[in-house]
């Protein structure tokens, strides 16, 4: 039985997607072995045997479809077309200022019933403002800003993911911008979406992404004098021994190995 709720439709469509063939996964290069400082199969945490492969960066082909699938033109195509038109694309006003769609959007990804625009960081604020103000888009609410750390993605190790909701059209979309670890700066969206204030502080706290233009970019979870950013994949797990019934359990990178 199908549901009329868009989020439930997306989940139902995702459940019907074919699993990626094991042979395809094995052909992809290995991006990382182990996690949180554990790198041996004998590590008792289980992280030592983890193998993470790097999927190729590809753009989704047209038609994008919608939350229910991509077999034919749908809701996601409408969003992409309206954004392209608004960003000085075909049919836009000659007086329109700002970046072209091709200059601002690096690629479009549709995966498991969800739409993501990968935006060049220097154009993130302009794209977000267009998503908010354009009547045919009208994504009025930023429901969250989160971070992702890809240590092997050279030149784009840190990603900021912006989750947008259109209350008017009942649609969801993501904007994703990346920056190198050596220059971890991404424009703040607080001037466009004030609700992103604390979300950007949390992303800065845990991942070290500096949101330029934020009114008060300080830690929000960790103590002010904390060293490092705990949700980065190169950050050791634990670091403080855990006491359990009189026994101390050290962090994974200090535990006994059985190899």
Image (cartoon, helix red, strand yellow):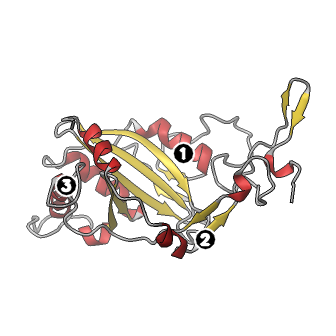
Residue 35 appears in view: yes
Q: In terms of secondary structure, where does tag 3 sit? A: helix
Q: Position of residue 73 (x, y in %)?
A: 14, 60
Q: In terms of secondary structure, where does tag 1 sit? A: helix
Q: Is residue 175 rendered to the left or right of residue 214? A: left
Q: Residue at x 25, y 49 (%)?
A: 67
Considering only order in the chain, which callout, 2 or 1, is on the residue closer to the N terminus?
2
Nearer to us in this view, 71 or 65: 71
Tag nearer the camera, 3 or 2: 2
Residue 140 appears in view: no
Q: Quadrant of residue 50?
A: bottom right
Residue annotated with mark 3: 79
Q: In the rendering, which numbered label is found on residue 14?
A: none
Q: CA distance from mark 3 to mark 2?
A: 34 Å
Q: Quadrant of residue 42?
A: bottom right
Up the image or down, 235 lies above or below 190; here it is: below
Q: Quadrant of the N terminus?
A: top left
Up the image or down, 2 lies above or below 207; here it is: above
Q: Residue at x 70, y 52 (%)?
A: 47
Would you say the residues marked 3 and 2 are in contact, meaning their CB atoms lie under 8 Å apart? no
Q: CA distance from mark 1 to mark 3?
A: 27 Å
Q: In the rendering, which numbered label is found on residue 30?
A: 2
Q: Position of residue 121 (x, y in %)?
A: 42, 62
Crowding near the residue tagged with mark 2, few <14, some 14–19, many ≥20 C-alpha atoms within 10 Å: some
Q: Is residue 123 rendered to the left or right of residue 154? A: left
Nearer to us in this view, 148 or 131: 148
Q: Is residue 155 rendered to the left or right of residue 234? A: left
Residue annotated with mark 1: 203
Nearer to us in this view, 181 or 113: 113
Nearer to us in this view, 163 or 123: 163
Up the image or down, 43 lies above or below 95; here it is: above
Considering only order in the chain, which callout, 2 or 3, is on the residue closer to the N terminus?
2
């Amino acid at each position: 039985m199908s549901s009329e709720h868009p989020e439930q439709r997306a989940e139902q469509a995702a459940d019907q997607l074919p699993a990626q063939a094991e042979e395809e996964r094995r052909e992809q290069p290995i991006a990382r072995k182990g996690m949180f400082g554990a790198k041996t199969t004998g590590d008792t945490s289980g992280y030592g045997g983890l193998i993470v492969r790097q999927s190729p960066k590809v753009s989704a082909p047209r038609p994008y479809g919608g939350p229910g699938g991509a077999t034919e033109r749908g809701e996601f195509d409408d969003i992409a077309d309206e954004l392209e038109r608004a960003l000085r694309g075909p049919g836009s006003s000659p007086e329109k200022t700002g970046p072209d769609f091709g200059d601002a959007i690096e690629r479009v990804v549709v995966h498991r019933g969800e739409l993501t625009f990968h935006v060049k960081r220097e154009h993130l604020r302009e794209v977000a403002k267009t998503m908010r103000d354009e009547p045919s888009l009208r994504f009025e609410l930023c429901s969250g800003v989160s971070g992702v750390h890809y240590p092997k993605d050279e030149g784009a190790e840190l990603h900021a993911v912006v989750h947008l909701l259109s209350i008017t059209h009942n649609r969801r979309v993501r904007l994703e911008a990346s920056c190198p670890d050596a220059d971890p700066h991404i424009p703040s969206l607080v001037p466009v979406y004030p609700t992103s204030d604390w979300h950007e502080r949390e992303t800065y706290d845990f991942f070290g992404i500096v949101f330029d233009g934020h009114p008060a970019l300080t830690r929000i979870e960790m103590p002010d004098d904390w060293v490092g950013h705990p949700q980065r994949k190169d950050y050791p797990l634990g670091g403080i021994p855990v006491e359990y019934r009189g026994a101390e359990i050290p962090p994974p990178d200090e535990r006994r190995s059985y190899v």
